[in-house]
Image (tube, rainbow, N blue to C red):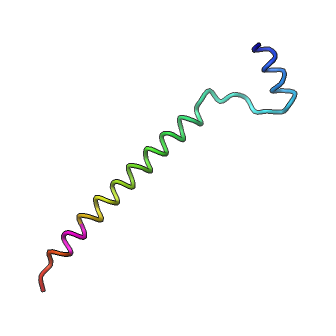
């Protein structure tokens, strides 16, 4: 089965298997984006709270 898969991959000009590294990269980037969104939300809430407490 492995030989057939390799033959078809070469014949069709498909790239080699990346071993799941691209999937891992997508998951890591998604987690980083989620953490950045949470951080921006926290900072926004904190700044808004401080701004509302300013008395003139």
Which residue is farthest left?
Answer: 55
On screen, residue 49 above or below 30: below
Q: From the viewer's perspective, tell me whether residue 1 is left or right of residue 23.
A: right
On screen, residue 48 above or below 3: below
Residue 9 rendering spot, x and y as whole percentages: 80, 27
Q: From the viewer's perspective, tell me whether residue 55 is left or right of residue 26.
A: left
On screen, residue 1 above or below 19: above
Taking the spot 26% from the left edge, 64% from the top edge, the residue there is 45
Residue 13 rendering spot, x and y as whole percentages: 83, 33
Taking the spot 12% from the left edge, 86% from the top edge, the residue there is 56
Query: Residue 30: within the magenta?
Result: no
Taking the spot 84% from the left edge, 26% from the top edge, the residue there is 10
Q: To which quarter of the image does residue 1 belong?
A: top right
User: What main secondary structure does the magenta stretch of the protein show?
Assistant: helix
Q: From the viewer's perspective, tell me whether residue 23 is left or right of residue 36.
A: right
How many circles with numbers are drawn on the protein?
0
Q: From the viewer's perspective, tell me whether residue 33 is left or right of residue 52.
A: right
Q: To which quarter of the image does residue 3 belong?
A: top right
Which residue is farthest bottom?
Answer: 56
Magenta stretch bounds: 47-51
Taking the spot 49% from the left edge, 45% from the top edge, the residue there is 29
On screen, residue 30 above or below 1: below
């Amino acid at each position: 089965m492995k030989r057939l898969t390799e033959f078809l991959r070469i014949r069709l000009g498909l790239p080699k298997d990346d071993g799941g590294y691209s999937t891992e990269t997508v998951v890591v980037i998604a987690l980083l984006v989620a953490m950045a969104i949470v951080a921006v939300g926290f900072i926004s809430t904190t700044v808004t709270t401080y701004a509302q407490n300013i008395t003139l």
